[in-house]
C-alpha cells in the first residue's frame, strides 16, 4: 500500500501543497524533493518490517531535512506526513489542541537537528 500512496505524492503535488502554505513556492533543490518523496517506498522495499508510521515519519523528516523549498519545509513535511498517515487509515498527526504545540516543537527539532528520524517515528507510534 505504501507504494500506491507514494505514487500519489509527486513533486507536483508537494509543490502545490507548498504553494498553499507560502505565497510563492520555489523549489531550490528538485532532486532533494524527489529523494524525500520516494523515501517511504524505498524503506518499505528494503526494510519491510518498518511500520506505516515510520514510513510517514521518513517522508516528513526527508522534506524537513532536505529543505527542497525556499520556504515552508517544516509545514510541507508535516502535511505530507499527515496525509500519508490519513491515506493509510490512521487519524493523522493532530487530534487535540494540545497536540499542536507538541508537533510544532517536534518539527522545529527535526529542522535544528535535535530530533532524529527514530524519535519522530516513536512519537508517531505513541500518538497516532
Image: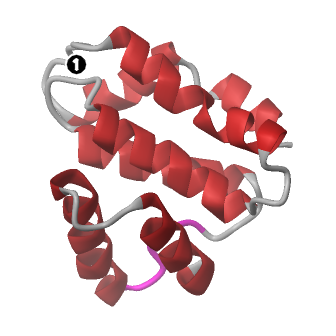
**Residue 94 forms part of the magenta stretch:** yes
Do we see residue 93 in this rendering?
Answer: no
> In which quadrant of the rendered view does residue 32 lie?
top left
In which quadrant of the rendered image does the C terminus lie? Answer: bottom right
**Residue 114 forms part of the magenta stretch:** no
Q: Position of residue 16 (x, y in %)?
A: 39, 22
Along the line of sight, which residue is nearer the eye, 60 or 85? 60
Q: Is residue 91 above or below residue 49?
A: below
In which quadrant of the rendered image does the N terminus lie? Answer: top right
Q: Residues within 10 Å of mark 1 (few under 14, many from 20)?
A: some
> In which quadrant of the rendered view does residue 27 lie?
top left
Q: Position of residue 88 (x, y in %)?
A: 76, 55
Question: Looking at the magenta stretch, what is its main secondary structure?
Answer: loop
Along the line of sight, which residue is nearer the eye, 122 or 27? 122
Q: Residue at x 29, y 24 (%)?
A: 68
Q: Position of residue 94 (x, y in %)?
A: 44, 73
Q: Is residue 27 left or right of residue 5?
A: left
Do we see residue 13 in this rendering?
Answer: yes
User: What residue range appears in magenta?
Assistant: 92-96
Q: Is residue 119 above or below residue 110?
A: below
Residue topped by disc 1: 25
Q: Is residue 7 above or below residue 103?
A: above
Q: Is residue 18 above or below residue 84?
A: above
Q: Residue at x 70, y 67 (%)?
A: 90
Q: Residue at x 48, y 13 (%)?
A: 12
Q: Position of residue 100 (x, y in %)?
A: 29, 76
> In which quadrant of the rendered view does residue 10 lie?
top right
Along the line of sight, which residue is nearer the eye, 122 or 10? 122
Q: Secondary structure at mark 1?
A: loop
Amino acid at each position: 500500500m505504501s507504494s500506491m500512496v507514494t505514487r500519489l505524492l509527486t513533486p507536483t503535488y508537494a509543490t502545490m501543497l507548498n504553494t498553499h502554505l507560502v505565497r510563492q513556492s520555489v523549489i531550490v533543490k528538485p532532486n532533494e524533493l524527489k529523494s524525500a518523496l520516494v523515501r517511504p517506498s524505498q524503506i518499505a522495499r528494503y526494510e519491510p518490517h518498518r511500520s506505516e508510521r515510520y514510513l510517514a515519519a521518513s517522508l516528513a523528516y526527508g522534506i524537513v531535512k532536505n529543505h527542497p523549498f525556499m520556504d515552508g519545509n517544516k509545514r510541507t513535511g508535516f502535511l505530507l506526513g499527515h496525509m500519508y498517515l490519513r491515506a493509510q487509515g490512521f487519524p493523522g498527526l493532530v487530534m487535540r489542541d494540545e497536540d499542536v504545540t507538541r508537533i510544532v516543537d517536534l518539527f522545529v527539532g527535526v529542522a535544528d537537528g535535535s530530533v532524529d528520524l527514530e524519535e519522530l517515528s516513536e512519537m508517531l507510534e505513541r500518538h497516532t
